[in-house]
Image (cartoon, grey):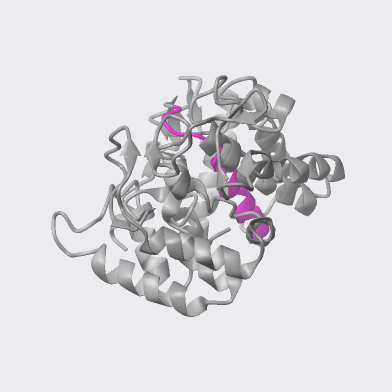
C-alpha cells in the first residue's frame, strides 16, 4: 500500500503556483496540481484503486489533466515535470478520466465537456499511427512500430471515449468511438487465433506467437492476445466460445516460458507465457471468471500473490511502475480487479 502512495507527486508550491505544460507559471484554482503520470502502467489498477480509496486525489488528477490539455494542447501520455515524454503507447489518461466520470467523482459538467473534447483530440491527431488507424481500421506494420499493441490499446481507449460520450449525452461521438472500439477484430487471425501484424491487407509471415519483436510493446503475441478488456465477451465469441477461450488461457499459463526474437528485459515473472513483471498481462488471470471457471482465476491469483511478491529488495517480479505492481497486489488481496 505504501508503494502505491509514492507517485504521482505534488508539483505546485504552497501558494498553488505551478509550472504548466506551456512552461508558464500558473495558479491552480481547482485542486492540487500533480506530475509523474505513468499512465500506460497505472490506468490498469493504480488509478481504479485510487477511485476507491482516494476520491479527492483522483479528482485532482483529472483537474491536472484538464490544465495540461488547456496549457499544453494534449492530455498527458507519460508526463514528467510538465514535459511529455511519449515513452509509452496509447492515450491512457482517457480511461482514468472516463472511470472518474462514470463513478461520479467529477462533479461539474463543464469539466466533463472539456475532457470529452480533449479525449477526441488525443484520438485524432496525426501521429503515432492514428492517421493509419482511421484510414484502414488498423495500423499497418510497415507504417508504425508496435502496430499490433497500438491498434489494440487504441481500441480500448476509444471504448472509454464512447462511454464518456454516452454519459454526457453526445450520441455522435458515441457512435464514432464505439465503432472504433471494435477495430481490434481487424487484426485477429482466425487461422492461428492470435492478433497479428498486417501489411498491405495481409498478415505478416512467418509468424511465431512467442517472438518478441517491434510489432508489440515489450511483449509478444501471447502477451497481447487477451488484450480486449472492453469486449471480453466479443472476444470469447471470436475465438469460438467459452471452451475455446479456456483452452487458450490454459495454454498461456501452462505452456513453455521460452520466448524467441529480441531480448526484452521487461518480460519477467513468467508463468507459461503470462508475464506478471509487465503490465499487458495483469488482467489475464481474471479472464477465467468470464468463461465460467472462476476457480482458475482464484488459483492463479493465489499463486501470483504468493510467488511474485516478497518483502525483500528484489521482492517484485518487475518494475514497480509508479504503483501499478503494488496496486495489483492490494486489489487482488481484496478479491477485486478492474479488468475493464
Residue 185 within the magenta-colored segment of the rendering: no
Residue 240: percent from left, percent from top: 66, 61
Q: Judge whether 294 appears above or below 223 on screen.
A: below
**Residue that sits furthest to the bottom in the current view:** 295
**Residue that sits furthest to the left in the current view:** 313
Residue 285: percent from left, percent from top: 45, 65
Looking at the image, which is closer to me, 113 or 189?
A: 189
Residue drawn at (42%, 46%), measured in percent from left and top? Answer: 41
Query: Can residue 335 be seen by looking at this rendering?
Result: no
Query: Can residue 256 be seen by looking at this rendering?
Result: yes
**Residue that sits furthest to the right in the current view:** 171
Residue drawn at (46%, 36%), measured in percent from left and top? Answer: 216
Residue 47: percent from left, percent from top: 48, 54
The quarter of the image holding the C terminus is bottom right
User: Horizontally, is 135 left or right of 106 in the view?
Assistant: right
Q: Which residues are magenta?
A: 86-104
The quarter of the image holding the N terminus is bottom left
Q: Quadrant of residue 296?
A: bottom left
Looking at the image, which is closer to me, 292 or 335?
A: 292
Looking at the image, which is closer to me, 54 or 16?
A: 54
Residue 67: percent from left, percent from top: 56, 33
Looking at the image, which is closer to me, 65 or 277?
A: 277
Residue 89 within the magenta-colored segment of the rendering: yes
Q: Judge whether 145 appears above or below 106 on screen.
A: above
Q: Judge whether 139 appears above or below 330 on screen.
A: above
Q: Quadrant of residue 88?
A: top left
Amino acid at each position: 500500500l505504501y508503494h502505491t502512495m509514492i507517485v504521482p507527486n505534488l508539483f505546485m508550491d504552497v501558494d498553488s503556483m505551478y509550472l504548466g505544460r506551456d512552461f508558464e507559471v500558473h495558479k491552480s484554482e481547482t485542486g492540487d496540481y500533480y506530475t509523474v503520470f505513468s499512465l500506460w502502467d497505472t490506468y490498469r489498477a493504480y488509478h481504479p484503486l485510487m477511485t476507491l480509496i482516494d476520491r479527492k486525489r483522483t479528482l485532482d488528477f483529472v483537474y491536472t489533466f484538464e490544465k495540461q490539455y488547456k496549457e499544453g494542447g494534449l492530455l498527458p501520455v507519460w508526463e514528467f515535470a510538465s514535459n511529455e515524454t511519449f515513452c509509452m503507447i496509447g492515450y491512457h489518461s482517457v480511461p482514468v478520466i472516463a472511470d472518474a466520470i462514470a463513478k461520479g467523482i467529477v462533479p461539474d459538467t463543464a469539466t466533463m465537456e472539456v475532457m470529452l473534447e480533449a479525449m477526441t483530440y488525443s484520438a485524432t491527431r496525426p501521429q503515432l499511427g492514428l492517421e493509419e488507424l482511421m484510414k484502414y481500421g488498423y495500423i499497418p506494420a510497415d507504417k508504425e512500430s508496435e502496430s499490433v499493441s497500438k491498434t489494440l490499446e487504441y481500441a480500448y481507449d476509444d471504448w472509454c471515449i464512447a462511454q464518456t460520450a454516452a454519459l454526457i449525452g453526445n450520441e455522435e461521438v458515441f457512435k464514432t468511438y464505439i465503432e472504433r472500439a471494435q477495430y481490434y477484430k481487424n487484426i485477429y487471425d482466425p487461422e492461428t487465433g492470435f492478433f497479428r501484424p498486417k501489411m498491405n491487407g495481409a498478415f505478416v509471415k512467418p509468424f511465431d506467437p512467442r517472438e518478441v519483436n517491434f510489432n508489440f510493446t515489450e511483449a509478444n503475441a501471447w502477451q497481447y492476445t487477451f488484450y480486449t478488456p472492453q469486449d471480453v465477451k466479443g472476444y470469447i465469441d471470436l475465438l469460438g466460445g467459452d471452451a475455446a477461450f479456456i483452452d487458450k488461457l490454459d495454454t498461456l499459463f501452462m505452456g513453455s516460458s521460452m520466448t524467441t526474437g529480441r531480448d526484452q528485459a521487461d518480460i519477467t515473472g513468467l508463468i507459461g507465457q503470462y508475464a506478471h513483471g509487465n503490465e499487458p498481462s495483469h488482467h489475464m488471470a481474471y479472464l477465467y471468471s468470464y468463461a465460467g471457471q472462476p476457480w482458475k482465476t482464484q488459483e492463479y491469483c493465489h499463486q501470483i500473490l504468493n510467488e511474485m511478491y516478497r518483502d525483500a529488495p528484489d521482492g517484485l517480479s518487475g518494475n514497480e511502475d509508479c504503483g501499478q505492481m503494488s496496486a495489483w497486489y492490494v486489489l487482488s488481496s481484496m478479491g477485486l480487479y478492474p479488468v475493464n
